[in-house]
Image (cartoon, rainbow, N blue to C red):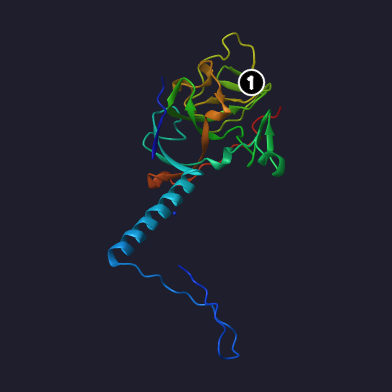
């Protein structure tokens, strides 16, 4: 299990002989025999390998994280446990798979399952601290323009409807008050606790290769169990 640093800053042998009767041939299994010690060791090895394969397979699409810090309050609380969907952000540009499967495009990035959406709660490797995982909300997609003014976030000139915000921004972004465009292959993220979040308003973007996955299920504590809603493009349209 990983922790999100979110502070402010799972022998068959067919019988081939011809039967003596006219009944339909039957396929049977023969159980291979080994010495008692060797058989147990072999079965144990197979179990370990199978368990490892299942674990790695599941780990490649789902991972669990624990929230640390207050920057996503009140949406997420410190000590809360989440399942993260890595599959949500699988991208295949530049691979042979890109030719044969339908994809969704965001700039030069081709996603298998739609990719990031505005409003997604996302886990990513922090660009400023690559050894740490942050959790924030995606606000700007590639080519969006972003402006934060008087506590309101504007995307492509339209104010966002953000009912999840209880602590609005107390800053202006960018500092000169002019909208800034999100570069291709990057994302603009903010914490829900706007005044107490180390995020993109400090001047950095999140590259697509830093995205770990989208928050999917909150499973602990029991009072917070539930599906984390995915983002929606209805917040603001280009």
Residue 199 lies, with reference to residue 110, above or below; the image says: above
Residue placed most toward the observer, 74 or 33: 33
Please, which residue is most extreme toward the left here?
37
Residue at left 47%, top 74%? 29
Asked which secondary structure carries label 1, the reply is: loop
Disc tally is: 1
Q: Left of 60 or right of it: where is 22?
A: right
User: In the rendered image, which quarter contains the N terminus?
Assistant: top left
Residue at left 52%, top 40%? 86
Residue 42 lies, with reference to residue 71, above or below; the image says: below
Please, which residue is most extreme toward the front here?
17
Please, which residue is most extreme toward the top here?
176
Residue 63 lies, with reference to residue 49, above or below; the image says: above
Q: Position of residue 158 (x, y in %)?
A: 67, 24
Q: Position of residue 8 (x, y in %)?
A: 41, 22
Residue placed most toward the observer, 234 or 39: 39
Number of other residues with Cα within 10 Å of mark 1, as a class: few under 14, some 14 to 19, many 20 or more: some
Residue at left 68%, top 38%? 104
Q: Give the quarter of the image for residue 5.
A: top left
Residue placed most toward the observer, 106 or 70: 106
Q: Give the quarter of the image for residue 92.
A: top right
Which residue position holds label 1? Answer: 183
Residue at left 29%, top 67%? 36
Please, which residue is most extreme toward the bottom here?
21
Q: Give the quarter of the image for residue 153.
A: top right
Q: Position of residue 197 (x, y in %)?
A: 46, 23
Q: Position of residue 193 (x, y in %)?
A: 47, 26
User: In the rendered image, which quarter contains the C terminus?
Assistant: top right
Residue 60 lies, with reference to residue 49, above or below; the image says: above
């Amino acid at each position: 299990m990983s922790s999100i640093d979110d502070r402010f800053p799972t022998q068959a042998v067919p019988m081939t002989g011809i039967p003596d009767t006219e009944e339909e041939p039957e396929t049977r299994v023969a159980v291979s025999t080994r010495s008692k010690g060797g058989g147990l060791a072999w079965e144990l090895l197979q179990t370990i390998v199978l368990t490892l394969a299942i674990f790695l397979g599941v780990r490649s699409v789902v991972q669990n994280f624990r929230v640390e810090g207050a920057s996503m309050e009140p949406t997420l609380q410190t000590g809360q446990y989440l399942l993260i969907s890595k599959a949500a952000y699988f991208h295949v540009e530049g691979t042979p798979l890109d030719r044969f499967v339908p994809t969704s495009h965001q700039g030069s990035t081709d996603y298998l399952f739609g990719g990031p959406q505005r409003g997604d709660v996302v886990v990513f490797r922090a660009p400023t601290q690559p050894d740490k995982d942050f959790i924030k909300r995606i606000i700007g997609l590639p080519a969006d323009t972003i402006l934060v003014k008087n506590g309101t976030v504007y995307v492509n000139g339209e104010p966002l409807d953000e009912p999840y915000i209880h602590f609005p921004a107390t800053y202006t972004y960018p500092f000169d008050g002019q909208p800034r465009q999100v570069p291709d292959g990057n994302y603009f993220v903010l914490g829900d606790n706007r005044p107490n979040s180390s995020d993109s308003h400090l001047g950095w973007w999140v590259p697509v290769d830093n995205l770990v996955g989208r928050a999917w299920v909150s499973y602990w504590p029991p009072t917070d169990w539930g599906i984390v809603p995915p983002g929606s493009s209805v917040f603001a349209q280009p």
